[in-house]
Amino acid sequence: MSMAIDAVSWALILAGSAFCVVGALGLVRLRGFYPRTHAASVIDSAGAGLLLAGLMLQAGWTLATVKLLTIGLLIFFTSPTATHALANAALARGLSPDPHAKEEPSKR
Amino acid sequence: MFAAAAVALLAALGLALARAIGGPTVFDRALAANAIGTLALLMLAVIGFLTGRPEFLDLAILYGLLNVVGTIAVLKFFRFGDLGDPGEAEGER
């Protein structure tokens, strides 16, 4: 039983790491700001969620699991808020969501 | 296996850092900084398990709290031009 839990936990941790790398790769490779927000949210949702779930299975029923759950809830609620504020601020400052428009350089 | 996760997170951190350095707009940099914050939080949790010291999870919680506050503060500055200082009267500018 414990070996099965170990296997599931390793699979979750490796999948979470893979999603983190894929999200960071998208952060570098995608064109335009708004597609990049999509790539960054992969890190926050899939990467962090799977990685923390795997670590929770490793920790078992201890205080570490409660802390990991707290971190997961924190990311779950704050990351979409931050991404929404980011996209909202970019739109308010006149960054075009049109993917074919030329990227305008920073004003500051 | 924790080491594999740590190496993958390091690679992701490097890529996000490249975007933070080379991002054309300030919003790209803020987005990359937010991603770096999340990745550093995960890195702290993994390092805590890697070295067998779960105290690192407390640092990870603190880092998550600071990350969102920092992102919102930077965004408010770049959207409105200031942080909404109440001591500064409108007519004095």
Image: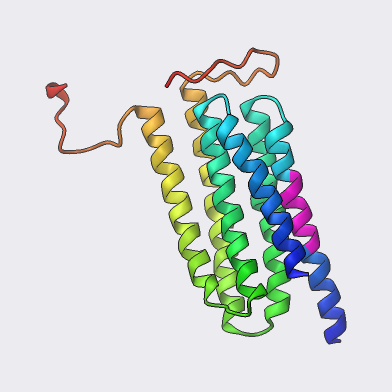
Residue A19 magenta-drawn? yes
Please state the horizontal and vertical placement of residue B88, each as a whole percent of the image.
16, 33
Q: Which scheme is used to colour this image of the protein?
A: rainbow
Please state the horizontal and vertical placement of residue A61, each as a whole percent of the image.
65, 85
Magenta: main secondary structure:
helix
Q: Nearer the viewer, residue B57 or B6?
A: B6
Residue at x 53%, y 34% (from the top left corner): B29
Q: Nearer the viewer, residue A79 or B58?
A: B58
User: Which quadrant of the rendered structure holds the C terminus of chain B?
Assistant: top left
Residue B1 versus residue A105 in the image, above or below: below
Please state the horizontal and vertical placement of residue A62, each as a whole percent of the image.
61, 85
User: Which quadrant of the rendered structure holds the N terminus of chain B?
Assistant: bottom right
Whether residue B87 is visible: yes
Please state the horizontal and vertical placement of residue B35, each as a whole percent of the image.
59, 46
Q: Nearer the viewer, residue A105 or A51?
A: A105
Whether residue A87 is visible: no
Residue B22 versus residue B58 in the image, above or below: above
Determine whether, in the image, residue A93 is placed left or right of residue A52.
left
Residue at x 13%, y 22% (from the top left corner): B91
Looking at the rendering, which quadrant does residue B24 occupy? top right
Looking at the rendering, which quadrant does residue B28 occupy? top right
Looking at the rendering, which quadrant does residue A22 occupy? top right
Residue at x 41%, y 38% (from the top left corner): B74
Residue at x 56%, y 38% (from the top left corner): B31
Determine whether, in the image, residue B77 is placed left or right of residue B33.
left
Residue A9 versus residue B28 in the image, above or below: below
The mark total stands at: 0
The magenta stretch spans which residues? Answer: A14-22
Residue A11 magenta-drawn? no
